[in-house]
Image (cartoon, rainbow, N blue to C red):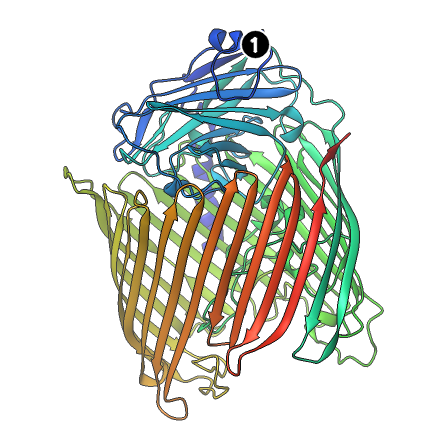
Amino acid sequence: MRIGLTFLVFILLTSLCFAQKINYSYQLEIKKATSPIEIDGVLDEPAWLEADVAKEFYMILPMDTSYSQVETEVRMTYDEENLYIIVVNHHAVPGPYYVESLRRDFAFGKNDNFLLFMDPFDDQTNGFSFGANAAGAQWDGIMFEGGKVDLSWDNKWVSKVQNYDDKWVFEAAIPFKSIRYKNGIKEWGINFSRLDLKTTEKSSWAPVPRQFPSASLAYTGVLVWDDVPPRAGANVSLIPYVMGGSVNDFENNVEPSYQNRVGMDAKIALSSSLNLDLTVNPDFSQVEVDRQLTNLDRFELFFPERRQFFLENGDLFANFGYETIRPFFSRRIGLDAPIQFGARLSGKINRDWRIGAMNMQTAKVDETGQPAQNYSVVSLQRRVGQRSNIGAIFINRTAFDIDPNVEPGIVPHQQFNRNLGFEYNLASSNNLWTGKALYLKSFSPTEDGSGMVHAANLRYSSGSLTWEWRHEYVSPDYTAEVGFVPRVGFYRINPSFAYLFFPKSKKILRHGPQVSTSLFYNMDLEQTDNISMFAYTVRFRSQSDLTAWVGHDQIVLQDPFDPTNFSGDTLAAFTDHRWMTVGGEYVSKPQSLYTYSLSTQYGGYYADGNRFNAMGEVGYRFQPYVGINLSANYNEILLPEPWGRTRFWLVGPRLDLTFTNTLFLTAFAQYNEQIKNINLNTRLQWRFKPASDLFFVYTDNYLPAPFYVKNRSLALKFTYWWTL
């Protein structure tokens, strides 16, 4: 009944999605260049002097009711090969700009920057983002779900920034071959965003309400072409790599192994909006290692995907479901067995249809008994109305040559596991209403056919008021071996509410309360978890944040659980635990060269115990070349015997050197007392040509006491992006 009512509400709200584009009246004409363009950050070519100018930006923050005080001027043009943009970012207040470093894909809120948000399908859902900070560091990402940007996406383009006393100028050339777009349409969605930290102003060309990110594609203006954009033509890129390295396992006294590998990726544009990716013997040794976490949770922790092959149009696969109900999670592929080859088709078929199809093959691992496996995923998405869509997904994992001596039913070695899913994503034309409804069904040899999920949420977000209703059901025998579903066998209800006040104050930008509760029930509809929180947040005009909160937890354990995740001693299943917690957090303003954040919480814990937690992070930058950062997390848990008092430190110093915007060195250490490990990682990257790199990566893991190295790896990798 609840599902039917939710779908009915979604269908009624879908009528809101057919309204005309909100900022359609904001139009910038783009004409073909009448002269060659040199990317030098200087506005002196005749083509620029003849181009239309987008100016008179609107303020988003601190208020969204006036024009920006910081002046920005944008011009765009094109030729047969490239889309060009030049931006003059005027200063409103004298003084130096603020940047973190020259590193690519910088943190938005910590840098003076200019960003372009482009919707070349004019569907207000998918697109691309390009930009730079005031020191010339590039930003590029693929856009999905109407306003989210995945910065892990990387492609070929060139840019230059020039700094002057009263302004900084950004100029870029984006090859048509580097983006996907719909052939034959003369209107693209477009918006420009400017962040100026000296004035704490965020602004955009086409106005965006302050409750939404400037990346929101629902609020783009229109880029009007004088002719249909040029076809990208034959677009085939080969990206070979050569890698040499060694791995030393001192802990198990294993002879050193030397890894000399050669492989290749290929990117083939089947159309201007549909791409085929191929990979043979891929290697991901250059990917930065995961940040370690202190784990006091009963369930598996989530770590994001960082491997480039899985990222473009990744929302077609990875965003199906919710954060803890993901039928597909690409990190299940290739982390415990080498990938032999794979293919991925993704993109737009036409204005309304998107497709994603992936097939990956992994090798057998004799040491662990892991069989060779094949992973296949097919996803379809159909636009409904202006910004909503319906989608379907099918996921299959098949194992080959399973060892007959392995006990049946062990999850990694089942012959197959399959998932079939459907979902509806609601997004109103003004983005005030968003939501999702989904249904998943799993199939495997150990199931009786009852493994299923249904869930839905509905969210309303205006300038001051935000509320959301969400419910979930995951059956006890639902399995998603290629997904991320850390918990099964529950019903969940999760309402939340927030309200913001915007006072006429020179110090405070906004403040207000937030209330949320998460209620879990077992299959007999008996409550097992009640996790509720009341918080009050304050955002200062300096862009610093202060939050205070109080929480209530009630948990009836469904399985034995070690509350330290360390000792091995467990609390009994079906025991009831209740406690209160208070906490607070402060994040300093990003304009300072010295930045910091502090958070703490204190309260009860399992078995009538107590837990104190303190986290902090301090950083200093010698802009734009050096960034020094130190993070620390301390937990002290007091429990009855046999646990007693348990203390955990997690400390992580980090050094970032950006010699230029193409040469980077990152070195960091992680001391995790809970798992008794010290991790050292050093990565040097030289981007000698756009999207072509040389990497040197050195990693050590140590046992803290007695101090000795457990394992060590060294890798040198060369990649080259060759466009045919």
Q: How many marks?
A: 1
Please give the name of the residue rendered at 44% of the width and 64% of the height, measured from the top-left corner: 652
Name the quadrant containing residue 349.
top right
- View extreme (bottom): residue: 641
Q: Is residue 22 above or below residue 266?
A: above
Please give the name of the residue rendered at 41% of the width and 43% of the height, measured from the top-left corner: 100
**Residue 453: x percent and y percent?**
56, 60
Q: Is residue 453 above or below residue 101?
A: below
Looking at the picture, tell me which residue is in the foreground, 523 or 95: 95
Crowd rating for badge 1 (residues with CA inside 10 Å; few <14, some 14–19, many 20+)? few
Name the quadrant containing residue 123.
top right
Res 683 visible:
yes
**Residue 361: x percent and y percent?**
78, 56
Q: Is residue 576 above or below residue 260?
A: below
Looking at the picture, tell me which residue is in the foreground, 593 or 638: 593
Q: Secondary structure at mark 1?
A: loop
**Residue 718: x percent and y percent?**
71, 46
Please give the name of the residue rendered at 34% of the width and 65% of the height, measured from the top-left corner: 615
Res 104 visible:
no
Looking at the picture, tell me which residue is in the foreground, 12 or 174: 174
Which quadrant, please, contains the C terminus? Answer: top right
Looking at the picture, tell me which residue is in the foreground, 487 or 197: 197
Q: Is residue 157 left or right of residue 428?
A: right
Q: Is residue 104 above or below residue 444?
A: above
Please give the name of the residue rendered at 34% of the width and 29% of the height, measured from the top-left corner: 203
What kind of residue is marked 1? Asp
**Residue 325: x percent and y percent?**
54, 59
Q: Which residue is mark 1?
A: 226
